[in-house]
Amino acid sequence: MRITNWLPAFASTQRPVTLGLSDNWRQIALLVATNMFVGGMIGMERTILPGLAEQEFGVTSKTAVVSFIATFGLAKAGSNLLVGPLTQWLTRRRILIAGWMIGIPVPLLLIWAPAWGWIIGANLLLGVNQGLAWSMTVNMKMDLAGPRFRGLVLGFNETAGYTSLAVMALLTGIIADSYGLRPEPFYLGTAIAATGLAFSVLFIRDTSAHLALETGGISGAAPVRSSFKSNFADGTWRKPYLFGITQAGLVKNLNDGVAWGIFPLYFASQGLSLDRIAILVAVYPLVWGGLQLATGWASDILGRKPLITVGMVLQGTAISVTAGVDSYGVWLGAMALLGLGTALVYPTLLAAVGDAVPAADRAAFLGVYRFWRDAGFIVGALLAGAVADLFGFKPAIQLIAAITVGSGVLAFFTVRGRSS
């Protein structure tokens, strides 16, 4: 295969613009690879930071320990919300590259931070990096694939990102167990950030022409877009089916904030070593990431609502079992079940948003959805941290489990969409 098929600077533009997998598989594959780097940026923190807070910086309050997750969620949610307006001024490719440029300093700050406040600052940058870069890999794949293969390509995207996250969580945990919490585990992060930026600059093409084709504007006037205020209201409360999707996304990341910030501390309180904690922390996103290719495709066939409802209930069940049984083997099974429930939900929710809104407004609506979804990090981290400080880990985890099951029930009565 010639290099001109891959490098945007030298690629031929003679081939007609079409939607679907067969003509766009190269760029879809490159975007999948790009999202592996995006996911790896979160994975480098997943096992390390809760322990780092207590051991190196003397942070003992559980609420304070998980503050880095709340900060990350705030920055990512805000960036997601800005993505819609930004796409009216900048191309998707430029936003992707900007996200990587903002992510470059993150591992360096984690290595050199002299105080916990620097870690908080690094997670502000990481949140922006994830909000811009991950959002663009989602939008660009949807532009290329068209409506028929929307769930499938989102399954590819999320599988790549979260499998990479899991691998990095495991690797950094193993490295930290052998060499210490800093700086060695974060050396991988510097390589990922630099490679992700170079990859996006050299290989990724913009998808504006594909979006124009889907909206019918390739040879006519630019499509009419709804206002930001209208999109935010529709996605937040005005349209019940969009509200059902949004609340499920928020609760999904609410429980992910607990898995990220509280579970490592909880497992450590039960006497587990760092390498065993790393395995537990990695199993959840590994199963989540590995199954999303199948679940995204399944949602195209079975419909969005069944997968969302069942997935939320399975997540709540797994979280409850984690706090209810003190056994490493059971915890492994619970983490796998949590990963399965998340895999059913995660790409399906994104695809459900794409089903429910006009193509011209898709980036804006996805930004609103991802804003509320990633606000779940803030709610989950602070709520679970506060309850853990007051009553202990197990009541905090069981509260999150109940909220997650309730969200699944609410989704059953509100969500609609393709084939559901």
Image: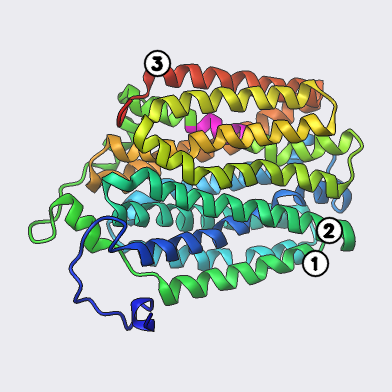
The amino acid type found where label 1 is placed reads Glu
Q: Which residues are magenta?
A: 249-255
Are the two marked residues, 2 and 3, in contact with CB atoms closer than 8 angstroms?
no
Q: Measure how far apart labels 3 and 1 are at the Cα level.
A: 48 Å
At numbered mark 2, what does the secondary structure look like: helix, strand or loop?
helix
Q: Earlier in the sequence, mark 2 or mark 3?
A: 2
Task: Give coordinates of residue 270: x percent, y percent.
Answer: 89, 33
Task: Give coordinates of residue 248: x percent, y percent.
Answer: 48, 28
Task: Give coordinates of residue 61: x percent, y percent.
Answer: 81, 36
Image quadrant occupied by the N terminus:
bottom left
- Using the image as rendered, state which of residue 238 and residue 420 is in the foreground: 420
Neighbor class of circle 3 (other Cα within 10 Å; few <14, some 14-19, many 20+) is few
On screen, 258 above or below 323? below
**Residue 251 in view here:** yes
At numbered mark 1, what does the secondary structure look like: helix, strand or loop?
helix
The amino acid type found where label 2 is placed reads Ala
Image quadrant occupied by the C terminus:
top left
Task: Give coordinates of residue 46: x percent, y percent.
Answer: 70, 49
Residue 184: which disc?
1
Q: Measure how far apart labels 2 and 1 are at the Cα level.
A: 7 Å
Q: Quadrant of residue 297?
A: top left
**Is residue 349 highlighted in magenta?**
no
Task: Write the residue at 72% across / 61% down.
Answer: 110
**Is residue 251 highlighted in magenta?**
yes
Residue tagged 3: 413
Are the two marked residues, 2 and 1, in contact with CB atoms closer than 8 angstroms?
yes
Residue tagged 2: 176
- Using the image as rendered, state which of residue 259 and residue 80 is in the foreground: 259
At numbered mark 3, what does the secondary structure look like: helix, strand or loop?
helix
- Direction from residue 121 to residue 142 in the image, left or right: left
